[in-house]
Image (spheres, coloured by chain):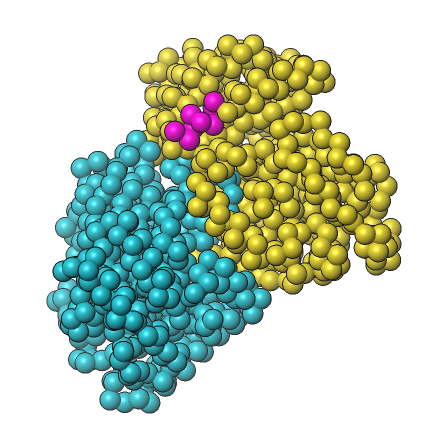
Chain colours: A cyan, B yellow
Amino acid sequence: MNAPTSKNHLLPEINQREVPAALIDALKARFEGRCSTALVVREQHGRDESSFDAPPPAAVVFAESTAEVAEVVKLAAQYKVPVIPFGVGSSLEGHLLAVQGGISIDMGRMNKVLSVNADDLTVTVQAGVTRKQLNEDIKSTGLFFPIDPGADATIGGMSATRASGTNAVRYGTMRENVLGLEVVTASGEIIRTGTRAKKSSAGYDLTRLMVGSEGTLGVITEITLRIYPLPEAVSAAICSFPSIEAAVRTTIQVIQMGIPIARVELIDSNTVRMVNTYAKLGLREEPMLLMEFHGSPTGVKEQAETVQEIASEMGGNAFEWASTPEERTRLWTARHNAYFAAVQSRPGCKVISTDTCVPISRLADCLLDSVAEADASGIPYFLVGHVGDGNFHFGYLLDPAKPEERVAAEQLNHQLVSRALQLEGTCTGEHGVGLHKMDFLVTEAGTGAVQMMRTIKRALDPDNIMNPGKIFAL
Amino acid sequence: MNAPTSKNHLLPEINQREVPAALIDALKARFEGRCSTALVVREQHGRDESSFDAPPPAAVVFAESTAEVAEVVKLAAQYKVPVIPFGVGSSLEGHLLAVQGGISIDMGRMNKVLSVNADDLTVTVQAGVTRKQLNEDIKSTGLFFPIDPGADATIGGMSATRASGTNAVRYGTMRENVLGLEVVTASGEIIRTGTRAKKSSAGYDLTRLMVGSEGTLGVITEITLRIYPLPEAVSAAICSFPSIEAAVRTTIQVIQMGIPIARVELIDSNTVRMVNTYAKLGLREEPMLLMEFHGSPTGVKEQAETVQEIASEMGGNAFEWASTPEERTRLWTARHNAYFAAVQSRPGCKVISTDTCVPISRLADCLLDSVAEADASGIPYFLVGHVGDGNFHFGYLLDPAKPEERVAAEQLNHQLVSRALQLEGTCTGEHGVGLHKMDFLVTEAGTGAVQMMRTIKRALDPDNIMNPGKIFAL
């Protein structure tokens, strides 16, 4: 196999296990053209949106059914070789990297919406369905799936990382919206968790155990999700503020008052500038909140008026409204393009993204001190946040030729996470632990809890073949 | 120890393990008057609201702190003796019964509300705090904890059984409302799960694994919960219907339209009659929906008008309103007293309660056929339901002198559960598996999933001392 080639001193040791030729032969015999060992295919499946590098997997199998996933896992299990499920590769934490070698299972062809139960507000999909595809598919029913992490990720990947994003403040995260799963276990068995009932007390919550397990306990192959009626009325608004603090304090008050706002996103002035350059949006280059209100026409009006009132008291400007779907798309494009706009603002840069989440009352404390530190460091960054949930992201834009920048960025992240944990928050609100936050997880959860996770992992995957090397070292 | 005395042929085998005198001596030496072996105390801790019997635990320890719980568990672990946490004994499924003998840990003295974070809408409590005590305690903050299973259960017990109740249709269940836990593990170690952040992707979701684990993976000692602003406006209404079907079809439509109703409870005419007799309420003796609307004054009005419109189309009568807290309490007392009213309607009876939950579109199919079967059986019953969630309970009122009634009731329950599972529902919406639904769990979840639960249990509790004999046989 490839020798370790990590360029990243912060990665855990890369410890490639041998992938026997017999396994590759068996996979090629079984899957023919759908098992690739071409370097370009392997490399494409061996990286994600993180800034980490590792040797690519030994082969990629393009699975077309749960039974096929089970076959791959059984074959891999026979040789004690790792398997790594791959959706679209939008992970930010190195989840897809074959740090211990192994086989990548591309789930992209398992992209069928299997059933839509409009009457029950549930849908069952294969793991390779992306969130945009799902919403396109169910549009005619008047229903939608609200979880929106920005990237057009697969539902399988979103489940595996317990993703959330801009709508979570109102609709919850994958934790709240996955009702049941089909999972291929480490021994290649197919199990089902949960039912289509809205609630259940039937035994251990295997659904929630799998959601957020980052592929380390099994391969998620099918997901039953909650969906929601499209709100009768939707209005989006931008509000500019004289300072980040004013925007944050507005958010805190909105949440504390229990206003059921659907989205409330912070973008700092610097990031607005990047987005303007990237997409020529002509937005006012001040810290802004991007908000969306869902409900009945009266309800939306009521919510928006209350929020405008709070914002004005904090020094915010008058709302700029976007009520047509087109105008709303323009606004949300601005938000979703922040990452790409930022990357383009420093061509060739690598991004380290932070992901802390704190109780809402601590948001100002956590965010403002971290802004001051980031400004003092001189490292270019963008700042966006699902601030209604107390979650925000710095993206430090690093020149790969300047290793000292990475050291400084990791130091900033370390300070930020320490602050968030002290404020009773978490090191990762939605991106997952992956390769990058294993030490933080121990600090956050404590040795005892992480040891319990390890015990569960060892019991369910005794040969450590399910996406090994992620979440914790074994 | 006591010999097996089960009177119930449906109980799993009672398999009392020996509790060595040395352990009792050690507990008495350590806890003095707070370790009791008096029969009356043991018997009180050896039964619950279920109709099952088993010999009582060998001793009861009244714990006053997490450290004390850990001490009891460590001592018990040394002798491989079971420990069973006890809240108020309101389980309906035999969770508290010492079917394998052991030590009961009474959590009732761990009843402190440890911190209220009104700004973050979170509260941290000891496991022995009851839901009414919690609400009393936080009343002055303008916040409330909505989960209401009827009984004034402890928060620890509610977490352990993944309880829900009347408000779940709007506010979710314990699954959605527990943010974090402190747990004493099978080795007597104290761990913490979760943080006060609203969301997190930090490793396995140990919080959700513990919620609903029925004491089999650890003793829950502290719970951090979400709380909510008291709604600006609250209105409750009763609506009588010409048939159960009309009431159920109204509910289905309300839920499918996405109306954010806070409570929607079905009571059948028979049960209304029992409640009238019990509490002299003078309610119209027809199937009824008991509803509650929370929101802004406009929002509540809007919701209620829409629901009234739907109900009228289905043949429902005009709403009878209860807008003052006193009137509302009267209505909810009717609902909460249904169980006691029913028991009193057949003095000396034992109750077997069903707990199926199905997707909302299947509710009429599941419920109406089961009503017909129950009517045909001639066994007296009451029928209430959190129908907004697709969850309802038959309570079969059994004459203990007529064992054939129990057989018939179990048969009815069996038919009901089979129907619910066929309709993609669950055998237990909120009561848990306990002793009574182990076979149903296997049918519902499948052997593979239950085997995964067992593997987790064995890994985390190798000597099987945490409330053994519940959920599954090992």
Range shown magenta: B415-422
Question: At which x and y percent is residue A433?
Answer: 40, 67
Q: Residue at x 51, y 68 (%)?
A: A444
Q: Residue at x 52, y 30 (%)?
A: B355
User: Where B304 falls versus A150 (above or below)?
Assistant: above
Q: Is residue B416 magenta?
A: yes
Question: At which x and y percent is residue B79?
Answer: 75, 56
Q: Residue at x 67, y 51 (%)?
A: B465
Q: Quadrant of residue B7?
A: top right
Q: Quadrant of residue A336?
A: bottom left
For the N terminus of chain A, the quadrant is: bottom left
Q: Looking at this view, is A109 or B116 the one in front?
A: A109
> Could you tell whether A447 is left or right of A172 in the image?
right
Can residue B72 be seen here? The reply is no
Q: Looking at this view, is A401 or A237 the one in front?
A: A401
Name the main secondary structure of what is drawn in magenta: helix
User: Where A23 falls versus B355 (above or below)?
Assistant: below
Question: At which x and y percent is residue B407?
Answer: 59, 19
